[in-house]
Image: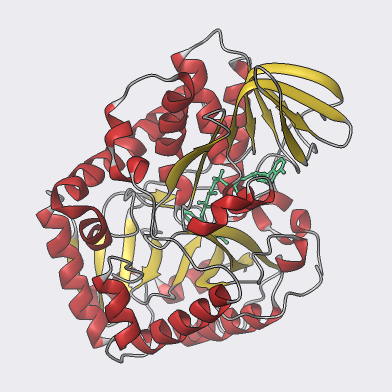
Amino acid sequence: MDRAAAQEPVRPIEEACYWLATRRHRPQPRLEGDARADIAIVGAGYTGLWTALFLKELDPGADIAVIEQGVAAYGASGRNAGMLAETIDHTHQLAIRHFGLEEARLLAHLGRENIEEMFSFMSHRGIDCELEQTGRLLVALTEGQVEDCRHTVEAAERLGVTDYRILSACEARSELDSPLYLGGVMVPSGGILNPAALVDGLLRAAVSEGVRVFERSRVTRIDQTRDGLVLRTGVGALRARKTILAMSAYTHHLLPGVLRRFIPLYDYILVSEPLTAGQLASIGWQHRQGVTDGRTFFNYYRLTSDNRLVWGTSEATYFGPNRVDEGCDHSEPHYASLRDSFKRHFPALAEIPFPYAWGGPICSTTRMTPFFGSANRGRILYVLGFTGHGIGSTRLAGKILAHLALEKMHPLLDLSIVRRKPFPYPPEPFRSMAVNAVTAALRRVDAGHNPSLLLRILDAAGIGFSS
Ligand SMILES: Cc1cc2nc3c(=O)[nH]c(=O)nc-3n(C[C@H](O)[C@H](O)[C@H](O)COP(=O)(O)OP(=O)(O)OC[C@H]3O[C@@H](n4cnc5c(N)ncnc54)[C@H](O)[C@@H]3O)c2cc1C
């Protein structure tokens, strides 16, 4: 999380991001003039579209409008790695640490149920987002991480999840052959998908339910009226009784107060040319699982449906003060470091070209899970803080937001992620200083050192970054 200098955009994101460059998107109109809706949603990513779909399910007569500054999937939902995990928190260990054993058990159950429901929704609605239910592979690169793998399986078992399986170095390498692997864990749940195609599928489903979606309509201001709110863009105004901000890392642009509880960061990804059959055979990977390693700043990787390699890093960067804009979409230092780490993992493929490279904004909280809030006497509702882990959990968030907006009871509203806010971040300039100090301390742990006093204090305060 270096405070690296942001660079001018080299290539527009619509060309640089493999998913956006190759998608089949049906454009939606701009908001022009005056419009009205019962509930307005700002942001056409997963959160906005799932929320619209759940609102329609709960109240089919409700008039719902979604308003998006770019095209749908312009944010993280169109730029992510498409690796779907079943956990709500990043790991079961973190869930236990942050919410206690009983609630962690419930979250583990809800996470699995959530992705099963998601799969069945996709299949009923004919959403083709290249979903492959491959499961997931966690790999250990140090002896300490081999030990962590054992803890991962034990934590899963404590929560009643009994299908995680420890892999020896040999077994891990028979799944995917990197000389760096010392062991791993096989997780049967989860899979890989095309993230922008998922947005396009959700968009089609929402429009077919009567949801209006406006694209290329940036909300620049929200004004209060006697009976609701007016969302203003340059050329249009949308009046609504309630507004849901599904803006993730951009939320502070309209609601600066939320910065107390989250920090916007950028993650970066490379995508290769398609691997030949020979190249694929040289590394194995018959089961095509998405892979993450055991570091805090881990690499994540997977294959696309045409066998390109997606190679990403969770070494997320903070561009102070709280920048989220096109100037952060590319980072040459991150691309160079991604190419280096790739060569170390797969020396046999060291020469493959990566024609696509991009970054995207994630929003992080001190507990690595989202939180919910309201403003303007409950007329504005929001969720943010998926911390690089939202493909599954945004669906659950959409269900929660829809119930909150319609003031309908649901057991999900009793969860701690809904009721409790995460520990706050300091404001600038202390924010940058804190990010740098914690990043340096976590890097040392990734390099095999024991956690520093700073990390132990944060841990004792319930602010866990690593598992
Ligand atoms: C590089 C990268 C890799 C990732 N990899 C994974 C992964 O493999 N697995 C996983 O589970 N998660 C991953 N994530 C995280 C995941 O993508 C996010 O958690 C998820 O997409 C959040 O969805 P969202 O709808 O809340 O936010 P977003 O998709 O960011 O949507 C917010 C939308 O609001 C719009 N908006 C913002 N401001 C305005 C405004 N003023 N007016 C109108 N519209 C506005 C934006 O344009 C955007 O479309 C990754 C994220 C990144 C960046």
In this view of the protein, which residue sits in the foreground, 392 or 141?
Answer: 392
Q: Name which residue lies at 42% across and 47% down.
A: 371
Where 191 sits versus 225, above or below?
below
- The reply, left or right, for residue 300 in relation to residue 151 is right
Quadrant assignment for the N terminus: bottom right
In this view of the protein, which residue sits in the foreground, 339 or 265?
Answer: 265
Could you tell me if residue 127 is visible in this image?
no
Q: Quadrant of residue 128?
A: top right
Q: Name which residue lies at 69% across and 44% down.
A: 23
All told, the count of numbered labels is 0
Could you tell me if residue 165 is visible in this image?
yes
Q: Name which residue lies at 25% across and 45% down.
A: 107
- The reply, left or right, for residue 312 in relation to residue 441 is right
Where 26 sits versus 282, above or below?
above
Where is residue 425 shown, x and y percent of the image? 48, 65
Where 258 sits versus 236, above or below?
below
Quadrant assignment for the C terminus: bottom left
Where is residue 105 shown, x and y percent of the image? 17, 47
Q: Name which residue lies at 27% across and 39% down.
A: 110
Q: Quadrant of residue 232?
A: top right
In this view of the protein, which residue sits in the foreground, 414 or 159?
Answer: 414
Colour mode? secondary structure
- The reply, left or right, for residue 164 in relation to residue 126 is left
Where is residue 121 shown, x and y percent of the image? 43, 27
Q: Quadrant of residue 208?
A: top right
